[in-house]
Image (cartoon, helix red, strand yellow):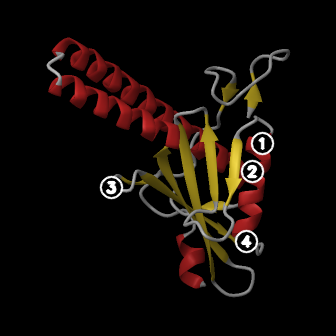
Amino acid sequence: MEAVSNNKIQTLTQPGLIKFARSAQRVHICWGDRAYELSYWTEAGLEKENLLQEVMDFLLSYNYFIAVDDGWSDWDLEIHQGIWSKIQVKACTENHGGNKRLLRLRCGLRMSQFATMAMLAYFVYTVVAILLGMSGVALITFLFGVLNAIVIFYQNFRLGRILYHVLEIVAKQLHLLPIHGNSTKPVVLNAVIQS
């Protein structure tokens, strides 16, 4: 990762400041869950905690807010960007004997609680305006709700893209091999079959 400017405060969300490396892995997208999955192979005995800690260290240097699971959630990390979007990261480790590990990540794009409340408020105000016969107010409220929904969708998409690239950078630093490369054949198919 290279920074383009030397004297400015840099964030991962400012376009053009960060150059991400070319993607090493195809993303498996689960449209119904609004999530994507990545898998990495290692023979160095790394566990999911190693990968998650490196991701946290990377993102904290860019002032992202990160919540760590306290044991009761169905996610391991929750990464927030701004007031509209967050990603919930679930990780698991499959042991394949000795130091062989398969690390699987599932990153779910979610609206923040504030975004959910805003969308609910737009809906309620629109319905109340319609019931009171104020069609002009209802139309304006509906249009603002649609505009805000587009902004939320864009923010979620952008955060998902940023996290994907961060995971690729961290995986490369930890010498993790992506299970599926950009081709149609798995990169480490022989290693997985032999284990």
Q: Are marks 2 and 3 in contact (CB under 8 Å)?
A: no
Q: Secondary structure at mark 3?
A: loop
| Earlier-in-chain disc, 4 versus 1 | 4
State which quarter of the image contains the N terminus.
Answer: top right
Task: Give the distance between the C-alpha atoms of the residues marked 4 and 3, in whole angstroms.
Answer: 28 Å
Pointer 1 or 3: first along the chain:
3
Pointer 3 local density, CA inside 10 Å: few below 14, some 14–19, many at least 20:
few
Q: Earlier in the sequence, mark 4 or mark 3?
A: 3
Residue at the spot of label 3: 32
Mark 3 belongs to which amino acid? Gly
Tell me the tag on residue 60. Answer: 1
Give the Cα distance between marks 4 and 1.
20 Å
Q: Quadrant of residue 136?
A: top left
Residue 105 spot, x, y in % from top left: 57, 61
- The amino acid type, in three-letter code, at marker 2 is Met
> Which badge, 2 or 3, comes first in the chain's sequence?
3
Q: Comparing marks 4 and 1, which lies closer to the viewer?
A: 1
Give the CA distance from mark 2 to mark 1.
Answer: 6 Å
Q: Please state which amino acid type lies under the numbered disc 1.
A: Leu
Residue 124 at x, y percent in the picture: 30, 33
The local crowd at label 1, few if under 14, some if 14 to 19, many if 20 or more residues have their Cα within 10 Å, is few
Q: Are marks 2 and 1 in contact (CB under 8 Å)?
A: yes
Task: Find numbered disc 1 in the image and state the secondary structure of the residue it sits on.
Answer: helix
Question: Label 4, on which residue?
Answer: 47
Does residue 128 appear left or right of residue 34 in this picture?
left
Along the polypeptide, which appears first: circle 2 or circle 4? 4
**Would residue 72 appear left or right of 10 to someone viewing this image?**
left
Is 68 above or below relative to 71?
above
Q: Which dot marks residue 121?
A: none
* Secondary-structure class at tag 2: helix
